[in-house]
Image (cartoon, rainbow, N blue to C red):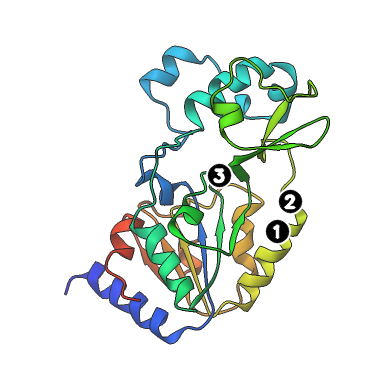
Amino acid sequence: MDATEQKISQLQQWIDESGYIVFFGGAGVSTESGVPDFRSVDGLYNQKYSEPPETILSHTYFMRKTERFFRFYRDKMLPLDARPNEAHRKLAELEQAGKLKAVVTQNIDGLHQKAGSREVLELHGSVLRNYCEDCGKFYGVEAVAQSEGVPRCACGGIIKPDVVLYEEALDDSVMYRAVEHIRKADLLIVGGTSLVVYPAAGLINYYKGDRLVLINLQSTAYDRYADLTINEKIGGVFSKIRV
């Protein structure tokens, strides 16, 4: 048994022994489903956009250059054909088995729910939900995906994606529920995130247990605080976990 297999075996033992597991995940959970990390710079992006994603996906940009915002948003942020991968599916199975109590995610793609997870705390919102800024009417993702220019409600208001843009605050109620779950956890599994986006990354500081697991291809600044680190693709790790 090599070092990675030993670590996965240790994770399996902790899962078997735990009754209140919480999973906290980031972009790396969805990249294995073909959802691109928008921070990565590809040829298409370089050809079509002169500004970095963090600028385009800001509240200021949305207000000042709304049509350009939606051009980028439709092109890069709506991977509607993506399907859950082994990590999403195994987490849903762990919840159904009564062991996993919550998924806390920075992702906005809805793949955890597609896999069957129910207690999903979306820190940054979801592309599947949209609302009129004027009358508050809610719309599905098709209202944005199938529109041209700036999508508008029947009342004339702009339909805004229910996602947290840069410069916008996270939802207090979602944060509160995430903190409560993490505080109660006897096993916290953090996967697919480099833990550099705050305030979300700071959530793991609320974990008071002694079974903090970090699963990420690259090392993170929190590795030294972890009780177990696995530098592998998260889908590959969860494919070896038994429920």
116 up-or-down from 169: above or below: below
**Percent from the top left, x then y, of residue 188?**
51, 71
Q: Can see residue 218?
A: yes
In this rendered view, identify the residue nearer to me: 211 or 33.
33
Label number found at residue 171: 2
Marks 3 and 2, how far apart at CA = 14 Å
* Count of numbered marks: 3
Mark 3 and mark 1 lie on one chain; the one further toward the N terminus is 3
Marks 3 and 1, how far apart at CA = 15 Å
State which quarter of the image contains the N terminus: bottom left
Three-letter amino acid code of the residue under disc 2: Asp
Tell me if label 3 and label 1 are in contact, CB under 8 Å: no
Label number found at residue 175: 1
Tell me if label 3 and label 2 are in contact, CB under 8 Å: no
On the image, numbered disc 3 is attached to which residue? 108
38 up-or-down from 72: above or below: below
Mark 3 and mark 2 lie on one chain; the one further toward the N terminus is 3
Query: Residue at coordinates 54% horizontally, 27% vertically from top-left?
Result: 145
| SS state under label 2 | loop
Three-letter amino acid code of the residue under disc 3: Ile
| SS state under label 3 | loop
| SS state under label 1 | helix
